[in-house]
Image: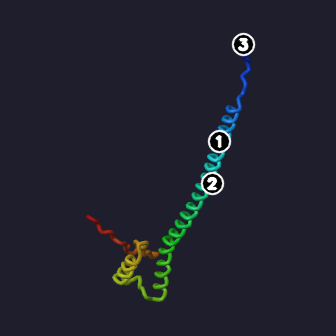
Amino acid sequence: MNHRKTNPTRKFRLRTTLVVSFVVQIVAAVGLTGWLSFRNGHQAVNELMNQISDKVTANVKKHFKTFADKPYQFLQINVATIRVGNLDLTDYPKMARYFWEQTQISDARCGTRAIRSTRQLPQFARQKIPQG
């Protein structure tokens, strides 16, 4: 009879070795590609976030400066108008008309208040019309 000797240590076959090595290489390649893609995507998102943040900050600064400068410009115009004598602070009807017209010029200009050292003069403000 033929007796085969069974070896307790299993022999590695060439086919098994090749399959295992290819699987390990494929898993390593896919894992490395996935990790590099994730890292590149993370960097791209951070860069885009910084660009958007910079644009938003620049726009907010620009609009705020425009909004904040308008009242000061109106104040300078009023001071110049009073200095050259085109607006008499004792002529209330003329002053009311002048300030009322100013409130209609710009959305940023919603009201005017004139104050003298002795007393406060009337306030002129834009009235919002209720919708409905």
Query: Where's the N terminus, which quadrant?
Result: top right
Secondary structure type for disc 1: helix
Q: x, y percentage for residue 80?
A: 49, 84
Where is mark 3, residue-wise? 3
Question: Which residue is situated farthest in the front direction here?
Answer: 1
**Label 1 vs 2, first from the N-terminus:** 1
Q: Distance between the residues labelled 3 and 2?
A: 66 Å
Mark 1 highlights which residue? 26
Q: Is residue 5 above or below residue 19?
A: above
Check disc 3: other Cα within 10 Å, few if <14, some if 14-19, many if 20+. Answer: few
* Residue occupying the point 29% across, 66% down: 130
Question: Which x, y percent locates residue 90?
Answer: 39, 83
Using a 10 Å C-alpha cutoff, classify the residue at mark 1 as few (fewer than 14 neighbours), some (14 to 19) or many (20 or more).
few
The residue located at (36%, 78%) in the rendering is 100
Q: How far apart are marks 1 and 3 (CA)?
A: 41 Å
In front: label 1 or label 2: 1
* Percent coordinates x, y for residue 105 in the rendering: 40, 78
| Dot 2: element | helix
Looking at the rendered structure, the kind of residue marked 2 is Gln
Neighbour tally class for label 2: few under 14, some 14-19, many 20 plus, Cα within 10 Å: few
- Residue type at tag 1: Ile
Please give the residue where the numbered disc 2 appears in the rendered image.
43
Which residue is at a point 68% across and 33% down the rendered structure image?
15
Q: Which amino acid does label 3 sit on?
A: His
